Image: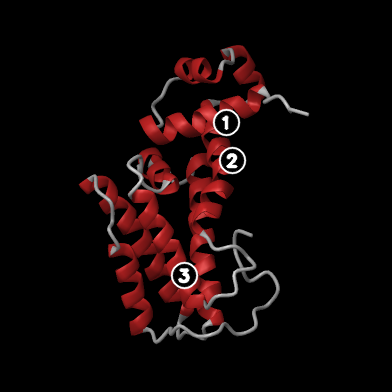
Amino acid sequence: MTTSVTPRERLLQAAGELFYRDGMNIGVDALCKAAGVSKKSMYQLFRSKDEVIAESLASRGPTYQAALLPSPDDERSPREHILTVFERQDRMTAEGNFLGCPFVSAAVELKDPEHPGSVVARRFKQHLTDFFRAELVAAEAEDPESLAVQLTIVFDGASARAVVQSQALAGIGVATAAALLDAAGVEQKAPTARPTGARIGS
């Protein structure tokens, strides 16, 4: 049985696509037209455009994470789990429609760290850092906190380069992350037992 898409879902889907492609300045009229929803209906569903921005980011966040992170039952080493993120990012940039990390793009454009969209973006970026940290702890890396932040910076910098240069990363993000792991002595070995809930984004 096919379930119909609700007006709220149509608005969030249209908002996610338009804000990512064209920026946050897209007007409410254009958004409602793309979603096939009236302005009256939109304001019955959301208190403001700012709320639509935040909810659309929160709605697309899990899908974006799932596209990057290895599955929870992936039994490869922590090093391979981490490099998988950069390998998948590399493939995204080669697809021809890559416009950067949606959360970084949103936060940069919104500028206000207290904007509800910025709060959502920050939360999802922290999820990625937490994922790296959990893997580094499993690998018994020294100072996993700092290294997780460094890996996040590599990820975000690689995304920005792909957008600015308008070209695929061609492995540079993977190589940079691998160099950081090499320097920290994170080798390709079997993972140690993890505490329950250590994996992020599952």
What's the amino acid at mark 1?
A: Leu
Numbered disc in front, either 3 or 1 = 3
Numbered disc in front, either 2 or 3 = 3
| Left/right of residue 29 with respect to residue 10 in the rendered view | left
Q: Nearer the viewer, residue 101 or 167?
A: 167
> How many numbered discs?
3
Q: Which residue is mark 2?
A: 59
Marks 2 and 1 close (CB-CB < 8 Å)? yes
Visual colour scheme: secondary structure
Q: Which residue is mark 3?
A: 82
Q: Quadrant of residue 105?
A: top left
At x 38%, y 54%, the residue is 91
| Dot placed on the residue nearer the N-terminal end, 3 or 1 | 1
How many C-alpha atoms fall within 10 Å of the one at disc 1: few (<14), some, or many (≥20)?
many
Where residue 48 appears, x then y in whole percent? 56, 26
Q: Up-down: is 86 above or below 4? A: below
How many C-alpha atoms fall within 10 Å of the one at disc 3: few (<14), some, or many (≥20)?
many
Q: Up-down: is 134 above or below 32? A: below
Q: CA distance from mark 2 to mark 1?
A: 7 Å
Q: Quadrant of residue 102?
A: top left
Q: Up-down: is 180 above or below 68? A: below
Where residue 95 appears, x then y in whole percent? 36, 45
Q: Which residue is mark 1?
A: 12
Q: Quadrant of residue 10?
A: top right
What's the amino acid at mark 3?
A: Ile
Q: Nearer the viewer, residue 1 or 40?
A: 1
